[in-house]
Amino acid sequence: MTNIKEAIKDTCYIWWDEMRQVVKDEGVLIFFILVPLLYPLLYSWIYNNEVVREVPVVVVDDCHTPLSRQFARQCDASPDVKILSYAADMDEAQSLLSRQVARGIYYFPSDFETRINRMEQATVSVYCDMSLMLAYKAVFQTAQAVSMQMGAEIQKRLGQHFTTREEQIAVQPLQAEEVAIYNPTGGYGSFIIPAVLMLIIQQTLVLGIGLSAGTARERNRNHHLIPLSPHYSGMFRIVGGKALCYFMIYLVMAAYLVLVVPRLFGFTSIGRWDYLAMFLLPYLLDCIFFGMVVSCLVRYRENVMLLMVFITIPLLFLTGISWPQSSISGFWQGISWLFPSTFGVRGFIRINEMGSTLSDVLPEYRVLWLQALAYFILASLIYRYAIRLARRDARLFSEE
Protein backbone atom coordinates (compact mmCIF):
# COMPACT_ATOMS: atom_id res chain seq x y z
CA MET A 1 0.00 0.00 0.00
CA THR A 2 2.88 2.37 0.82
CA ASN A 3 4.47 1.74 -2.58
CA ILE A 4 1.17 2.50 -4.33
CA LYS A 5 0.83 5.78 -2.44
CA GLU A 6 4.41 6.74 -3.30
CA ALA A 7 3.83 5.86 -6.96
CA ILE A 8 0.69 8.01 -7.08
CA LYS A 9 2.49 10.83 -5.27
CA ASP A 10 5.47 10.70 -7.63
CA THR A 11 3.18 10.55 -10.68
CA CYS A 12 1.28 13.62 -9.49
CA TYR A 13 4.56 15.41 -8.79
CA ILE A 14 5.84 14.66 -12.32
CA TRP A 15 2.50 15.76 -13.78
CA TRP A 16 2.65 19.05 -11.89
CA ASP A 17 6.32 19.61 -12.72
CA GLU A 18 5.67 18.96 -16.41
CA MET A 19 2.67 21.29 -16.36
CA ARG A 20 4.83 24.05 -14.88
CA GLN A 21 7.48 23.53 -17.53
CA VAL A 22 4.85 23.69 -20.28
CA VAL A 23 3.50 26.99 -18.95
CA LYS A 24 6.98 28.47 -18.62
CA ASP A 25 8.21 27.40 -22.07
CA GLU A 26 6.95 29.80 -24.76
CA GLY A 27 7.81 27.38 -27.57
CA VAL A 28 5.81 24.56 -26.05
CA LEU A 29 2.87 26.89 -25.38
CA ILE A 30 2.89 27.96 -29.02
CA PHE A 31 2.63 24.37 -30.26
CA PHE A 32 0.21 23.20 -27.57
CA ILE A 33 -2.15 26.17 -27.51
CA LEU A 34 -1.59 28.80 -30.19
CA VAL A 35 -1.02 26.56 -33.22
CA PRO A 36 -4.03 24.24 -32.57
CA LEU A 37 -6.22 27.31 -32.07
CA LEU A 38 -5.15 29.33 -35.12
CA TYR A 39 -3.79 26.78 -37.62
CA PRO A 40 -7.16 25.13 -38.40
CA LEU A 41 -8.83 28.55 -38.67
CA LEU A 42 -6.28 29.58 -41.30
CA TYR A 43 -6.81 26.39 -43.32
CA SER A 44 -10.58 26.63 -43.02
CA TRP A 45 -10.69 30.26 -44.13
CA ILE A 46 -8.57 29.43 -47.18
CA TYR A 47 -10.86 26.56 -48.23
CA ASN A 48 -14.12 28.07 -46.99
CA ASN A 49 -15.35 28.77 -50.54
CA GLU A 50 -15.31 24.98 -51.05
CA VAL A 51 -15.44 25.13 -54.88
CA VAL A 52 -13.80 27.22 -57.59
CA ARG A 53 -16.10 29.68 -59.33
CA GLU A 54 -15.77 31.99 -62.34
CA VAL A 55 -12.70 30.31 -63.83
CA PRO A 56 -11.44 32.58 -66.67
CA VAL A 57 -11.64 31.02 -70.14
CA VAL A 58 -10.70 32.49 -73.52
CA VAL A 59 -12.68 31.61 -76.68
CA VAL A 60 -11.27 31.12 -80.17
CA ASP A 61 -14.23 31.21 -82.55
CA ASP A 62 -13.33 30.42 -86.16
CA CYS A 63 -16.97 29.63 -86.91
CA HIS A 64 -18.58 33.01 -86.12
CA THR A 65 -22.11 31.63 -86.18
CA PRO A 66 -25.08 31.98 -83.80
CA LEU A 67 -24.61 28.39 -82.61
CA SER A 68 -20.98 28.88 -81.56
CA ARG A 69 -21.85 32.15 -79.81
CA GLN A 70 -24.75 30.43 -78.04
CA PHE A 71 -22.39 27.73 -76.78
CA ALA A 72 -20.00 30.37 -75.40
CA ARG A 73 -22.84 32.36 -73.78
CA GLN A 74 -24.20 29.29 -72.00
CA CYS A 75 -20.73 28.48 -70.66
CA ASP A 76 -20.41 32.06 -69.46
CA ALA A 77 -23.82 31.83 -67.77
CA SER A 78 -22.68 28.87 -65.67
CA PRO A 79 -21.36 29.57 -62.14
CA ASP A 80 -18.04 27.83 -62.77
CA VAL A 81 -16.77 29.54 -65.93
CA LYS A 82 -16.29 33.15 -66.96
CA ILE A 83 -15.58 33.99 -70.61
CA LEU A 84 -12.66 36.35 -70.28
CA SER A 85 -12.27 37.39 -73.93
CA TYR A 86 -12.39 36.28 -77.55
CA ALA A 87 -8.97 35.68 -79.10
CA ALA A 88 -8.21 36.19 -82.76
CA ASP A 89 -6.34 32.88 -83.07
CA MET A 90 -4.87 30.04 -81.02
CA ASP A 91 -1.51 31.77 -80.66
CA GLU A 92 -3.12 34.66 -78.79
CA ALA A 93 -5.15 32.26 -76.66
CA GLN A 94 -2.08 30.19 -75.80
CA SER A 95 -0.27 33.35 -74.77
CA LEU A 96 -3.05 34.18 -72.30
CA LEU A 97 -3.01 30.59 -71.02
CA SER A 98 0.77 30.50 -70.56
CA ARG A 99 0.63 33.74 -68.56
CA GLN A 100 -2.24 32.20 -66.52
CA VAL A 101 -4.50 35.08 -67.37
CA ALA A 102 -6.90 32.36 -68.51
CA ARG A 103 -7.22 28.80 -67.25
CA GLY A 104 -8.72 27.25 -70.36
CA ILE A 105 -9.51 27.65 -74.06
CA TYR A 106 -12.69 26.84 -75.98
CA TYR A 107 -11.96 26.43 -79.69
CA PHE A 108 -14.74 26.31 -82.33
CA PRO A 109 -13.54 25.16 -85.78
CA SER A 110 -14.81 26.91 -88.89
CA ASP A 111 -17.10 23.99 -89.81
CA PHE A 112 -18.74 23.74 -86.37
CA GLU A 113 -22.29 24.73 -87.39
CA THR A 114 -21.95 23.37 -90.92
CA ARG A 115 -21.34 19.84 -89.65
CA ILE A 116 -24.34 20.08 -87.32
CA ASN A 117 -26.58 21.24 -90.18
CA ARG A 118 -25.36 18.27 -92.20
CA MET A 119 -26.35 16.03 -89.26
CA GLU A 120 -22.70 15.18 -88.65
CA GLN A 121 -20.83 15.18 -85.37
CA ALA A 122 -19.24 18.56 -84.60
CA THR A 123 -16.29 19.13 -82.30
CA VAL A 124 -15.53 21.73 -79.65
CA SER A 125 -11.92 21.56 -78.49
CA VAL A 126 -11.36 22.23 -74.79
CA TYR A 127 -7.84 23.08 -73.60
CA CYS A 128 -7.41 23.07 -69.82
CA ASP A 129 -4.69 24.19 -67.46
CA MET A 130 -3.89 20.93 -65.65
CA SER A 131 -1.67 22.59 -63.03
CA LEU A 132 -4.80 23.25 -60.97
CA MET A 133 -7.19 20.30 -60.93
CA LEU A 134 -10.13 22.31 -59.60
CA ALA A 135 -9.84 24.75 -62.51
CA TYR A 136 -9.62 21.86 -64.97
CA LYS A 137 -12.75 20.32 -63.49
CA ALA A 138 -14.71 23.58 -63.82
CA VAL A 139 -13.61 24.26 -67.41
CA PHE A 140 -14.11 20.73 -68.73
CA GLN A 141 -17.34 19.81 -66.94
CA THR A 142 -18.97 23.10 -67.91
CA ALA A 143 -18.21 22.51 -71.60
CA GLN A 144 -19.44 18.92 -71.28
CA ALA A 145 -22.71 19.98 -69.62
CA VAL A 146 -23.39 22.68 -72.24
CA SER A 147 -22.62 20.31 -75.12
CA MET A 148 -25.05 17.72 -73.74
CA GLN A 149 -27.77 20.34 -73.27
CA MET A 150 -27.34 21.82 -76.76
CA GLY A 151 -27.16 18.33 -78.25
CA ALA A 152 -30.47 17.47 -76.64
CA GLU A 153 -32.09 20.61 -78.09
CA ILE A 154 -30.78 19.79 -81.56
CA GLN A 155 -32.15 16.26 -81.31
CA LYS A 156 -35.56 17.62 -80.37
CA ARG A 157 -35.68 19.88 -83.44
CA LEU A 158 -34.55 17.15 -85.81
CA GLY A 159 -36.63 14.34 -84.33
CA GLN A 160 -40.09 15.63 -85.39
CA HIS A 161 -41.79 14.21 -82.32
CA PHE A 162 -45.46 14.81 -81.58
CA THR A 163 -45.41 15.03 -77.78
CA THR A 164 -43.10 16.36 -75.11
CA ARG A 165 -42.83 12.88 -73.62
CA GLU A 166 -41.55 11.48 -76.92
CA GLU A 167 -38.94 14.24 -77.01
CA GLN A 168 -37.78 13.43 -73.49
CA ILE A 169 -37.48 9.72 -74.24
CA ALA A 170 -35.63 10.34 -77.51
CA VAL A 171 -33.17 12.76 -75.92
CA GLN A 172 -32.64 10.81 -72.70
CA PRO A 173 -33.90 7.21 -72.91
CA LEU A 174 -32.03 6.32 -69.71
CA GLN A 175 -32.10 8.94 -66.97
CA ALA A 176 -29.25 8.99 -64.45
CA GLU A 177 -29.61 10.93 -61.24
CA GLU A 178 -26.45 12.15 -59.54
CA VAL A 179 -26.56 12.13 -55.73
CA ALA A 180 -23.53 13.46 -53.84
CA ILE A 181 -23.17 11.64 -50.52
CA TYR A 182 -20.95 12.53 -47.55
CA ASN A 183 -19.86 15.76 -49.30
CA PRO A 184 -23.05 17.28 -50.78
CA THR A 185 -21.39 20.49 -51.97
CA GLY A 186 -18.50 18.66 -53.61
CA GLY A 187 -16.29 21.10 -51.75
CA TYR A 188 -12.54 20.82 -51.38
CA GLY A 189 -12.64 22.08 -47.79
CA SER A 190 -15.00 19.34 -46.61
CA PHE A 191 -12.74 16.86 -48.39
CA ILE A 192 -9.33 17.88 -46.98
CA ILE A 193 -9.92 19.71 -43.69
CA PRO A 194 -10.88 16.64 -41.55
CA ALA A 195 -7.58 14.94 -42.43
CA VAL A 196 -5.66 18.15 -41.71
CA LEU A 197 -7.31 18.49 -38.30
CA MET A 198 -6.17 15.03 -37.21
CA LEU A 199 -2.67 15.68 -38.54
CA ILE A 200 -2.55 18.95 -36.57
CA ILE A 201 -3.21 17.01 -33.36
CA GLN A 202 -0.33 14.63 -34.07
CA GLN A 203 2.04 17.29 -35.37
CA THR A 204 1.60 19.78 -32.53
CA LEU A 205 1.75 17.08 -29.86
CA VAL A 206 5.02 15.69 -31.19
CA LEU A 207 6.50 19.17 -31.62
CA GLY A 208 5.49 20.32 -28.14
CA ILE A 209 6.68 17.13 -26.42
CA GLY A 210 9.93 17.26 -28.36
CA LEU A 211 10.58 20.87 -27.36
CA SER A 212 9.81 20.03 -23.73
CA ALA A 213 12.26 17.11 -23.77
CA GLY A 214 14.91 19.26 -25.43
CA THR A 215 14.48 21.90 -22.74
CA ALA A 216 14.85 19.24 -20.03
CA ARG A 217 18.11 18.06 -21.56
CA GLU A 218 19.46 21.61 -21.70
CA ARG A 219 18.40 22.31 -18.10
CA ASN A 220 19.60 19.08 -16.45
CA ARG A 221 23.21 18.29 -15.71
CA ASN A 222 25.08 16.27 -18.36
CA HIS A 223 22.10 16.76 -20.72
CA HIS A 224 20.02 14.02 -19.09
CA LEU A 225 16.47 13.40 -20.22
CA ILE A 226 15.22 13.41 -16.62
CA PRO A 227 16.32 15.45 -13.58
CA LEU A 228 18.23 13.89 -10.69
CA SER A 229 15.27 13.75 -8.34
CA PRO A 230 13.90 10.94 -6.13
CA HIS A 231 10.47 11.50 -7.67
CA TYR A 232 11.87 10.54 -11.12
CA SER A 233 12.74 7.01 -10.01
CA GLY A 234 10.24 4.86 -11.90
CA MET A 235 9.75 4.59 -15.62
CA PHE A 236 5.97 4.11 -15.41
CA ARG A 237 5.66 7.08 -13.06
CA ILE A 238 7.56 9.30 -15.47
CA VAL A 239 5.64 8.19 -18.55
CA GLY A 240 2.30 8.30 -16.71
CA GLY A 241 2.87 11.75 -15.18
CA LYS A 242 4.03 13.35 -18.41
CA ALA A 243 1.29 11.68 -20.47
CA LEU A 244 -1.35 12.89 -18.02
CA CYS A 245 -0.16 16.47 -18.46
CA TYR A 246 -0.31 16.31 -22.26
CA PHE A 247 -3.62 14.41 -22.24
CA MET A 248 -5.36 17.01 -20.07
CA ILE A 249 -4.26 19.82 -22.39
CA TYR A 250 -5.27 18.02 -25.56
CA LEU A 251 -8.66 16.94 -24.31
CA VAL A 252 -9.63 20.58 -24.72
CA MET A 253 -7.68 21.12 -27.95
CA ALA A 254 -9.05 17.96 -29.59
CA ALA A 255 -12.64 18.87 -28.68
CA TYR A 256 -12.10 22.28 -30.26
CA LEU A 257 -10.57 20.83 -33.42
CA VAL A 258 -13.08 18.06 -34.16
CA LEU A 259 -16.29 19.58 -32.79
CA VAL A 260 -16.01 23.37 -33.07
CA VAL A 261 -13.96 24.04 -36.22
CA PRO A 262 -16.02 21.93 -38.71
CA ARG A 263 -19.30 23.43 -37.46
CA LEU A 264 -17.84 26.93 -37.36
CA PHE A 265 -17.17 26.83 -41.12
CA GLY A 266 -20.08 24.63 -42.16
CA PHE A 267 -18.05 21.56 -43.14
CA THR A 268 -19.73 18.16 -43.15
CA SER A 269 -20.02 16.88 -39.59
CA ILE A 270 -22.66 14.23 -38.94
CA GLY A 271 -20.83 11.98 -36.49
CA ARG A 272 -22.10 11.47 -32.95
CA TRP A 273 -20.00 13.17 -30.31
CA ASP A 274 -19.79 10.07 -28.11
CA TYR A 275 -18.38 7.99 -30.97
CA LEU A 276 -15.89 10.75 -31.72
CA ALA A 277 -14.86 10.94 -28.04
CA MET A 278 -14.35 7.18 -27.79
CA PHE A 279 -12.31 7.17 -31.00
CA LEU A 280 -10.18 10.16 -30.00
CA LEU A 281 -9.22 8.55 -26.68
CA PRO A 282 -6.79 5.96 -28.15
CA TYR A 283 -5.72 8.42 -30.85
CA LEU A 284 -4.61 11.03 -28.29
CA LEU A 285 -2.82 8.42 -26.19
CA ASP A 286 -1.19 7.03 -29.32
CA CYS A 287 0.04 10.47 -30.40
CA ILE A 288 1.29 11.27 -26.87
CA PHE A 289 3.33 8.09 -26.47
CA PHE A 290 4.55 8.37 -30.06
CA GLY A 291 5.67 11.95 -29.35
CA MET A 292 7.46 10.82 -26.18
CA VAL A 293 9.36 8.16 -28.12
CA VAL A 294 10.35 10.67 -30.81
CA SER A 295 11.40 13.22 -28.18
CA CYS A 296 13.71 10.64 -26.59
CA LEU A 297 15.42 9.95 -29.91
CA VAL A 298 16.24 13.59 -30.77
CA ARG A 299 18.88 15.34 -28.69
CA TYR A 300 18.23 19.00 -29.50
CA ARG A 301 14.85 20.73 -29.45
CA GLU A 302 15.27 22.13 -32.96
CA ASN A 303 15.66 18.66 -34.49
CA VAL A 304 12.08 17.62 -33.79
CA MET A 305 10.80 20.62 -35.77
CA LEU A 306 12.93 19.70 -38.77
CA LEU A 307 11.74 16.09 -38.54
CA MET A 308 8.02 16.90 -38.37
CA VAL A 309 8.18 19.51 -41.12
CA PHE A 310 9.84 16.90 -43.33
CA ILE A 311 7.31 14.08 -42.77
CA THR A 312 4.00 15.97 -42.41
CA ILE A 313 3.17 16.19 -46.14
CA PRO A 314 4.12 12.55 -46.85
CA LEU A 315 1.93 11.49 -43.92
CA LEU A 316 -1.04 13.28 -45.51
CA PHE A 317 -0.53 11.30 -48.72
CA LEU A 318 -0.11 8.02 -46.84
CA THR A 319 -3.49 8.36 -45.11
CA GLY A 320 -5.21 7.54 -48.41
CA ILE A 321 -7.07 10.85 -48.60
CA SER A 322 -5.34 12.63 -51.46
CA TRP A 323 -4.33 9.36 -53.17
CA PRO A 324 -6.33 6.09 -53.08
CA GLN A 325 -5.17 3.67 -50.43
CA SER A 326 -5.41 0.78 -52.89
CA SER A 327 -2.89 2.50 -55.17
CA ILE A 328 -0.25 2.91 -52.44
CA SER A 329 2.46 0.25 -52.62
CA GLY A 330 2.72 -2.35 -49.88
CA PHE A 331 6.06 -0.97 -48.69
CA TRP A 332 4.72 2.53 -48.12
CA GLN A 333 1.55 1.19 -46.55
CA GLY A 334 3.75 -0.65 -44.07
CA ILE A 335 5.62 2.58 -43.32
CA SER A 336 2.32 4.40 -42.79
CA TRP A 337 1.28 1.89 -40.11
CA LEU A 338 3.99 3.29 -37.83
CA PHE A 339 2.20 6.63 -37.46
CA PRO A 340 -1.01 7.28 -35.49
CA SER A 341 -2.34 9.70 -38.12
CA THR A 342 -2.80 6.95 -40.72
CA PHE A 343 -5.55 5.13 -38.84
CA GLY A 344 -6.71 8.23 -36.98
CA VAL A 345 -7.56 10.09 -40.18
CA ARG A 346 -9.33 7.13 -41.78
CA GLY A 347 -11.47 6.38 -38.75
CA PHE A 348 -12.28 10.02 -38.01
CA ILE A 349 -13.48 10.70 -41.56
CA ARG A 350 -15.77 7.67 -41.54
CA ILE A 351 -17.32 8.68 -38.22
CA ASN A 352 -17.49 12.43 -38.77
CA GLU A 353 -18.43 12.61 -42.47
CA MET A 354 -20.08 9.27 -43.15
CA GLY A 355 -21.92 8.84 -39.86
CA SER A 356 -20.25 5.50 -39.08
CA THR A 357 -20.51 3.89 -35.70
CA LEU A 358 -17.58 2.70 -33.62
CA SER A 359 -18.12 -0.87 -34.82
CA ASP A 360 -17.75 0.32 -38.42
CA VAL A 361 -14.22 1.57 -37.69
CA LEU A 362 -13.28 -1.29 -35.39
CA PRO A 363 -10.08 -2.22 -37.31
CA GLU A 364 -8.71 1.33 -37.04
CA TYR A 365 -9.88 1.57 -33.41
CA ARG A 366 -8.07 -1.62 -32.44
CA VAL A 367 -4.88 -0.64 -34.24
CA LEU A 368 -4.81 2.71 -32.41
CA TRP A 369 -5.02 0.91 -29.05
CA LEU A 370 -2.29 -1.53 -30.10
CA GLN A 371 -0.08 1.34 -31.28
CA ALA A 372 -0.68 3.24 -28.04
CA LEU A 373 0.32 0.16 -26.01
CA ALA A 374 3.42 -0.45 -28.13
CA TYR A 375 4.62 3.15 -27.92
CA PHE A 376 3.86 3.22 -24.17
CA ILE A 377 6.10 0.18 -23.63
CA LEU A 378 8.80 1.63 -25.87
CA ALA A 379 8.71 5.01 -24.10
CA SER A 380 8.88 3.27 -20.71
CA LEU A 381 11.95 1.28 -21.76
CA ILE A 382 13.66 4.41 -23.03
CA TYR A 383 12.97 6.25 -19.77
CA ARG A 384 14.23 3.22 -17.83
CA TYR A 385 17.50 3.51 -19.69
CA ALA A 386 17.54 7.27 -18.97
CA ILE A 387 17.09 6.56 -15.23
CA ARG A 388 20.02 4.15 -15.21
CA LEU A 389 22.17 6.60 -17.14
CA ALA A 390 21.36 9.43 -14.72
CA ARG A 391 22.15 7.26 -11.67
CA ARG A 392 25.45 6.11 -13.16
CA ASP A 393 26.55 9.65 -13.89
CA ALA A 394 25.47 10.72 -10.41
CA ARG A 395 27.68 8.03 -8.83
CA LEU A 396 30.62 9.01 -10.98
CA PHE A 397 30.13 12.66 -10.07
CA SER A 398 29.97 11.86 -6.33
CA GLU A 399 33.13 9.72 -6.50
CA GLU A 400 35.02 12.58 -8.12
Image: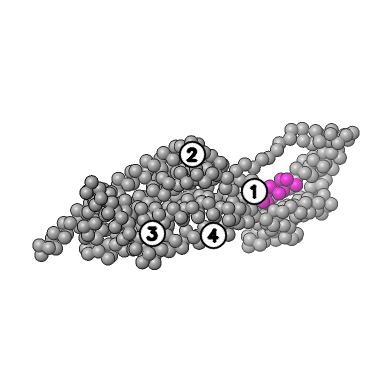
* Mark 3, residue position: 208
> Residue type at mark 4?
Leu
Q: Does the magenta stretch include residue 296?
A: no
Which comes sooner in the sequence, label 4 or label 2? 4
**Going by the image, does 116 lie left or right of 243?**
right
Of marks 1 and 3, the one in the foreground: 3
What range of the chain is rendered magenta? 137-146
Pick the front one: 341 or 65: 341
> Residue type at mark 2?
Leu
Q: Residue at x 67, y 51 (%)?
A: 138
CA gap, disc 1 to disc 4? 20 Å
* Mark 2, residue position: 358
> Residue type at mark 1?
Thr
* Mark 4, residue position: 41
Pick the front one: 80 or 45: 45
Of marks 1 and 2, the one in the foreground: 2
Residue 130 visible here: no
Q: Residues within 10 Å of mark 2 (few under 14, many from 20)?
A: some
Find out whether the residues at labels 1 and 3 contact each other: C-beta distance under 8 Å: no
CA gap, disc 3 to disc 2? 30 Å
Of marks 3 and 2, the one in the foreground: 2
Q: Residues within 10 Å of mark 3 (few under 14, many from 20)?
A: many
CA gap, disc 1 to disc 3? 36 Å
Q: Which residue is drawn at 36% across and 53% down?
A: 244
Q: Position of residue 114 (x, y in %)?
A: 83, 45
Which comes sooner in the sequence, label 1 or label 4? 4
